[in-house]
Image (spheres, coloured by chain):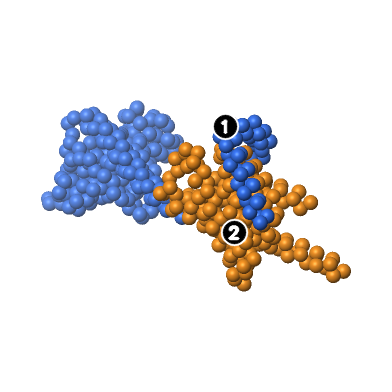
Amino acid sequence: MRYFLLGPLALTVALFQVAAGPYFPLLGATANPLLVLLMCWAMVRGPRETMVLIPLAAVFKDLITNDPVGVSLLALLPIVPLAAVRERHLTQSEFLPIVVVVVVASLCYHLVYMVVLTFLGEDVPWLQSPLRVLLPAALFDAVLTPLFYLPLRGATTLLESRTGLRAVG
Amino acid sequence: MRTIVWLLAAAFLALVTILLSQKGALDPLRNVALTVVSPLERGVRNAAEPVADLLDRLAERQDLEEENRQLRQQIEELRAEIAGLREQQSLSQELQELLKVQESRPGDKFLVARVITKDPSNLKERLAIDRGREDGVAEGMVVMSSGGSLVGKVSSVLDDFAWVTLITDPNSSVNAMVMESRTQGVVSGTLHGGLRMELLPQEAEVQPGNTVATSGLGGNFPDALLIGEVVSVQGSPQDIFKKAEVEPAAALSRLENVLVMTSFEPPRLDSTP
């Protein structure tokens, strides 16, 4: 049942990213709210649900852009192993590790994306991209993180407390 | 273990779809997806554009303020330049008119003078010009407008400036003549900046619209200088003389340049016996 809610949410975010993203650049780079949503989701609720959402949203995004279909799926895959950080409890704060993994996931996304494009024979500006694409995009994604994390954390906490009350009752 | 399997499967799926996509096998699917999504995409884009514009404007506000300040300064400079050019154009037109006056009186010599100020008193009708003794201006010289009509005469002279008493000054009196009937009288100034022609004989035919010019009597003014036009005639049959209100021909309140007739000097009446 939850996938009927999560699926459209991910698709909507992908649609907004494609349609509205180019209008809101930061330091010349556009954000990847789909990646931020999925990373936050995997960190707050565990990677299991994202394992369903990632292929769905990634393929949808590629279908409505000029990217080769599948490249976003490949680039978003690091989200799942990165979500293992949540099990380690490196800090007391949940938010800080999420920002870090969002930055890492963003860097991985672009690196994978660039590798795929290079293999497909496209010219990729490898030398310029770290400063012009990778870092600004990672920064932008980090800035977006609270926008997805806070509602997700709130909704998850609410759901967990209700479930707990039912179990006690 | 399950995660690894998933990762491998997903990576495999991604690679397959990339290959299929490169061969164009997924183009029909793309087409369907875009057909379904494009209206939504357009709606989102239409909604995003104004928001993005607003954010851009907010971000550029400081630049716009600076640009605005510079543009205002440019406007001010251009306005000043335009005002200067208009002034020059106006001066040029006036000088052309003055030249015509000069041509109409080839026997006389004129000096062009600029009006620099007016007497602020309500009781006097005088103005200052930027020509004085060093320019050859002397007391009693006749001053004319750029159109050739009488303005007044020089009443006091400084080295570089001179004061001109206008014909509308209450202390001014000019021997004049109604041109149509050759009737002679005296034109004096009134307190309201107007002119009154007095000492007109009762039987004289003076009508509104008649032209009044200097008569030359007394030698204070040359003859046939236009003074103005009769507006109204007053006087009852039992009066000895009639009076006429005269409208000055020169726009005395808006004078900018005048001509000083340097070739005409009134005779000096020395007090020596």
**Along the line of sight, which residue is nearer the eye, B97 or A33?**
A33
Considering depth in this image, is A45 or A148 the residue closer to the camera?
Answer: A45
Question: Which residue is at a point 80% across and 64% down the rendered structure image?
Answer: A163
SS of the residue under disc 2: helix
Image quadrant where residue B265 sits? top left
Residue B200: give x, y in percent of width and height.
Answer: 36, 36
Q: Is residue A160 above or below residue A39?
A: below
Chain letter behind tag 1: B
Check disc 2 and report the residue beneath it.
A82
The answer to which image quadrant residue A157 occupies is bottom right
- Does residue A7 appear in this view? yes
Q: Determine the residue positioned at 54% across, 45% down.
A: A22
- How far across and how far down the image is residue B222, in percent? 23, 36
Mark 2 closeness class: few <14, some 14–19, many ≥20 residues within 10 Å: some
Q: Chain of mark 2?
A: A
Task: Give the residue at x 23% y 48%.
Answer: B130
Left or right of B169 on screen, residue A144: right
What's the colour of chain A in the image?
orange
Q: Which residue is mark 1?
A: B23
Tell me where residue B254 sits by quadrant. Answer: top left
| Element carrying mark 1 | helix
